[in-house]
Amino acid sequence: MFINCKKQFGCDVQFRNRSARAPAWAARFMHKEDGGVTMLAFFIFVTFLIMGGVALDSMRHETARAALQATLDRAVLAGASARNATEARAIVEDYFAKAGKEEYLQAEQEGDITTTLNHARITARANISLDTYLMKLNGIDTLSVGATSTAEVEIPRLEGILVLDVSGSMAKNSKMANLKGAAKKFITDTVGAVDSENKGSVVMSIVPFSFSVSPPESIYNALAVDDRHNYSTCLEFQENDYHHSELTSGTSSLSSGIPANQMIYTSVYGGFDDLDQTWRSCYNEEPMRILPYSTDEAELHAKVDSLVPDGNTSGNDGMNWGAALLDPTFRQVTSAMIASNDLDPSLVNVPADYDDPDTLKVIIFMGDGANTTSYFFDVDPPKYRGVASDLYEVVYQDRIFDYAYNVKNVDRKVYGTEGEDLCSNPKWECIYQENGPKESVYYIFSESKRQYYSVGAASRGEPAWITSLEFNNLSTTVPGYIETIQLDWEEAWGLMSPDYYSSVVGSSDAIDEYFAFENVDGAKKNILMQKVCSATKTQNVVVYTIGFEVPQGGTAENELIKCATSPSHYYRATGADISGAFSSIAANVRHLRLTQ
């Protein structure tokens, strides 16, 4: 290149002009270089676009999945409180419908839902097909969003007591038949619903009550009782025994506690040794006895089937026994029952402590009428209580002559008729062999007549009344005489009614005292029942009550409402509708157990 120094500016201008007019090969080079930059930029742009699209669609996928999973979780948790599989599925579907996602819930599969009283396992599945936005650039048009959720609930133990009114009024209008059907269904829904792996997690007791409550011998023998007779196992409680949930004076009534009083067993009316009357102080038949702590559905059903209505109403005693069977102090009794093989050893911790978080305690109290008056003989002064009654038992036994021996020569024995003829000779002693069981005849002393009435004398061809002298000589006049026993009054009343005794001795003092003194009327029983209801509820025992065909707004209904944990825990039932009351309680109990 030549540059003229004198033409510097011209040279410069020329130089720039030449640069602007670059050769063709240079222009082509520069065009290719611009294209490379463009392609690279485009490649980078598309790459970032795809990456952003994946992130965006992934974020949409995760948001949908999280929302679907949350709906599933809530649905199966709610379904776990259902009473059965059908209800559980309906709850799950309802949750999805309210969330606007019902179209995404998949069909139920076999084994997805299992519900028993003590266990629930609910599984549900859902799926969404999500259209992609930018992942389509990578050939992916849709994303599948699937979710599965399972709720499994282990339910705590249940200790339940059915306190059932079996008074005489239950014989009317098929009430007893309706009760039996309802109670058995409740047992099936509770005890029968327990799977084999959790057998024993539901323990149920049945307490029938009418005039009184009859515990079984297994419980009676484990208690400290002031035994006075062997006719029945009923106990007589004092007023302060109803102020707490424990049995008798704040103790379990074992040997270390305060002995419970044994109730007199008698009937107001009836003949001698014929006390199977409606107006009995205590019912000792097996159907009337408590069935304690059973885990066997069949055993509980059999107990319900055996129930027979009779007698007056003492709801205070029914509730008192129901509370006692749930009180932890009664474990001393259950331990004694286990030791004597009267209770399954697996129940050693029953009743559980009140604050045991894994145990729910429930009483279902069913009554069909108001409490009525109970009668007792006066204990102060104890004219017709305690020792030395007016009834005497003369014990004898048929005997067969064996031989006679000489009192001065014991080796000299004479057998047969010849020897028996010597029995009246004071020089000879006769030996007899027992022939058959011991038997008894009874005599009632009349203070006014100063004579003894021979019970059943006419049937034996004997005079009805004998003098004191004749009575004292019975040891020589009664064949096979063994002894004469003056019975205690508690033993005497188990053989004769106050009405029968009064008719024999010619005085109404006994029957008048039975009706007039130690009676407890319905109003007093209501107070006692509310005392034990309150004490039981204080221990967080859930109390349900059922008024079965009771007058609306009457005394019976009002007392049942007050006894229940809350007014909503009271159920009014008529006829076969009592089954609905028990079913509703069963469902409520299940819900309580799930939310423990």
Image: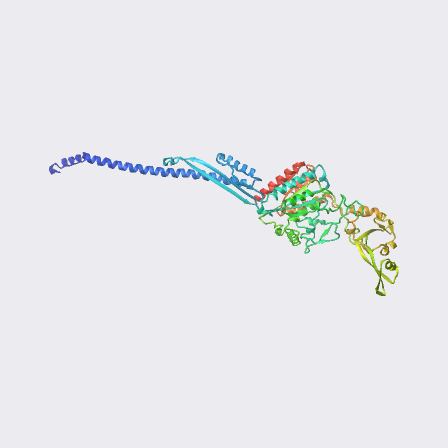
Give the left or right position of residue 505, taking residue 246 as reference. right
Residue 147: % across, % down? 47, 40
Q: Quadrant of the N terminus?
A: top left
Give the left or right position of residue 332, taking residue 50 as reference. right
Residue 477: % across, % down? 86, 55
Residue 445: % across, % down? 84, 51
312 or 309, which is in the foreground? Answer: 309
Residue 32: % across, % down? 24, 36
Q: Quadrant of the C terminus?
A: top right
In the rendered view, would you say 18 is above or below 311?
Answer: above
Residue 68 visible here: yes
Give the left or right position of residue 431, taking residue 330 as reference. right
479 or 133, which is in the foreground? Answer: 479
The image quadrant that residue 370 belongs to is top right
502 or 125, which is in the foreground? Answer: 125
Give the left or right position of residue 16, taking residue 539 as reference. left
**Number of marks in the image?**
0
Residue 163 visible here: no
Q: How is the image coloured?
A: rainbow
In the rendered view, would you say 240 is above or below 551?
Answer: below
